[in-house]
């Protein structure tokens, strides 16, 4: 049964008015959010984990199976053989009548078994209890002796020597067996673990080298994309790596060529159109000046004089508009990106503002190196300073490096821009000043062109409230 959105809302309201509560959606647990911050971010790390996790899982299963079956079975048989040998020697020692027979039993058992066997008539002897046994090998050996011997015994598997000590209570003393550890402990486990660790290390090295080789074309593609976004033209990129990466690289190269072709064609077309418009405007201006001289000679009425003045002002305004657009096109179409000192550039802008009698204070971090188009950025900074000079009495210029990025603030003490209109002023030909006076309102291209230039450098530009009471222009540029 389905409902429309409005019907569903009405049903929910009615359901609540009857005293019922709708089930609330489950909220994500904070623990998962915390784990999300620690998960690997790079493709290299994620791929490496995808390779290592099955490998470690398989090795863990092999180790468990080995310990649970093969190692325990082998150890049980070895310990059973040692326990049987100890029980046989103990039984033969008890059946001997004289001291010479007992000594012969000990000597023959020592030479045939490889154990060191002693008989001690006195000494401290404390039988081993089952609750004192820890470890798999200890438990296996204890159970084997317990099944074979009817005497109390003491077991010491963790003696720092190379022997396992087994003391068996007989008559008035006890038999002491020193069994070499290789009789009850197989070294195959060490070999297996060394083999698994060695092959895993070799496999890890091969995987790391292979992944680094596969990640290199992706990094080159990323660097080329960022460099192209900043206007760098000298980045050489050739398809390499896996077929998918080659396809992505070829697509990027084709896109880069199309964008360059489009920008070049647009720039040339607009430049040619602007030049073509300047020719008739210049001719019209010359004709008006000649007509003005004739009007002065004939001394016509004020009506013709005002008409002439209006036409002349319109032509001058159109010329200024075309010149400003041509100036932008010249910087956009021909300038190449290069490394430069941003601190010196901002200092030059500040000195130019001071020559125009603008009160300016600056806090510029020295030696800030950037990669970009110097002329285009200087035009942006000059435009922001000129806007502040028209609408404010003083300006504060700040630039510093923060977290690998350069942050520039232009703070003035003017009237500012209302927050609702701050996005509108970035649109072309939008002017907050409604008069036709270009000295106070401009043409509405300054901030629009400034945003284009900043975006072309991979940066951001925004308008905020200034601590001085006016407008703050914040520019963020990536280091290069």
Image (cartoon, helix red, strand yellow):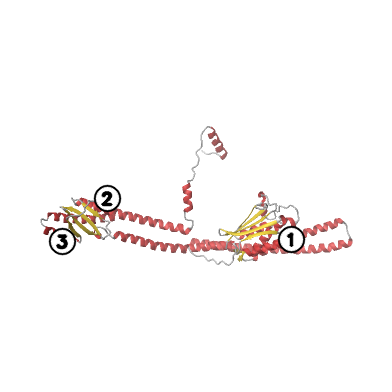
Query: Residues at badges 3 and 1 in contact (C-beta under 8 Å)?
Result: no
Q: Residue furthest front?
A: 123
Instruction: Please tell me which residue is depicted at 42% across the width and 58% down the height of the picture.
Output: 51
Q: Earlier in the sequence, mark 3 or mark 1?
A: 3
Horizontal side of 445 relative to 403 (left or right) equals right
In terms of secondary structure, where does tag 1 sit? Answer: helix
Density class for disc 1 (Cα within 10 Å; few <14, some 14-19, many ≥20) is some
Residue 100: where, in percent of width, then height?
11, 59
Q: Earlier in the sequence, mark 2 or mark 1?
A: 2
Q: Residue furthest left?
A: 97
- Reading the image, the residue beneath label 1 is 320
Quadrant of the rendering where the C terminus is positioned: bottom right
Instruction: Please tell me which residue is depicted at 31% across the width and 60% down the height of the picture.
Output: 190
- Reading the image, the residue beneath label 3 is 107
Density class for disc 2 (Cα within 10 Å; few <14, some 14-19, many ≥20) is few
In terms of secondary structure, where does tag 3 sit? Answer: helix
User: Quick check: can you spot residue 246?
Assistant: no
Q: Nearer the viewer, mark 3 or mark 1?
A: 3
Using the rendered view, name the quadrant where residue 307 is placed.
Answer: bottom right
Residue 465, numbered circle:
none
Residue 132, numbered circle:
2
Q: Earlier in the sequence, mark 3 or mark 2?
A: 3
Q: Residue furthest right?
A: 298
Q: Residue furthest top?
A: 18
């Amino acid at each position: 049964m389905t409902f429309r959105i409005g019907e569903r809302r009405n049903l929910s309201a009615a359901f609540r008015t009857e005293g019922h509560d709708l089930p609330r959606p489950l909220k994500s647990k904070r623990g998962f959010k915390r784990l999300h911050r620690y998960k690997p971010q790079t493709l290299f790390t994620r791929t490496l984990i995808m390779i290592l996790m099955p490998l470690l899982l398989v090795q863990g299963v092999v180790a468990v199976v080995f310990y649970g079956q093969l190692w325990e079975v082998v150890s049980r048989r070895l310990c059973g053989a040692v326990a049987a040998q100890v029980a046989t020697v103990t039984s033969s020692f008890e059946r001997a009548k004289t001291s010479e027979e007992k000594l012969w039993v000990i000597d023959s058992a020592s030479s045939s078994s490889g154990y060191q066997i002693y008989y001690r008539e006195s000494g401290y002897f404390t039988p081993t209890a089952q609750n004192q046994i820890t470890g798999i090998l200890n438990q296996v050996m204890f159970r084997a002796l317990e099944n074979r011997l009817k005497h109390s015994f003491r077991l010491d598997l963790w003696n720092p020597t190379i022997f396992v000590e087994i003391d068996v209570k007989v008559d008035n003393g006890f038999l002491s067996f020193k069994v070499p550890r290789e009789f009850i402990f197989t070294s195959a486990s060490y070999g297996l673990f060394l083999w698994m660790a060695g092959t895993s290390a070799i496999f890890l090295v091969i995987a790391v080298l292979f992944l680094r080789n596969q990640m290199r074309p992706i990094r080159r593609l990323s660097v080329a994309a960022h460099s192209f976004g900043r206007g760098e033209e000298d980045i050489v990129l050739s398809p390499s790596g896996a077929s998918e990466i080659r396809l992505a690289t070829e697509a990027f190269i084709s896109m880069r060529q199309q964008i360059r072709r489009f920008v070049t064609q647009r720039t040339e077309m607009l430049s040619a159109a602007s030049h073509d418009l300047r020719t008739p405007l210049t001719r019209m201006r010359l004709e008006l000046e000649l007509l003005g001289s004739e009007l002065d000679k004939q001394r016509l009425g004020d009506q013709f004089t005002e008409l002439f003045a209006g036409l002349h002002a319109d032509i001058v305004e159109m010329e200024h508009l075309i010149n400003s657009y041509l100036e932008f096109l010249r910087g956009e179409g021909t300038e190449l990106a290069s490394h430069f000192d941003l601190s010196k550039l901002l200092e030059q802008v500040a000195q130019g503002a001071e020559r125009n009698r603008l009160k300016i204070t600056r806090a510029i971090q020295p030696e800030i190196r950037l990669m970009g188009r110097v002329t285009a950025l200087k035009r942006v900074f000059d435009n922001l300073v000129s806007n502040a000079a028209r609408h404010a009495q003083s300006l504060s210029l700040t630039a510093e490096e923060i977290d690998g990025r350069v942050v520039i603030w232009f703070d003035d003490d003017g009237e500012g821009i209302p927050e609702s209109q701050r996005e509108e002023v970035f649109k072309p030909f939008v002017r907050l000043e409604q008069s036709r006076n270009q000295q106070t309102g401009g043409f509405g291209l300054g901030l629009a062109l400034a945003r284009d230039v900043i975006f072309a450098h991979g940066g951001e530009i925004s308008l905020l409230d200034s601590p001085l009471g006016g407008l703050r222009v914040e520019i963020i540029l990536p280091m290069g």
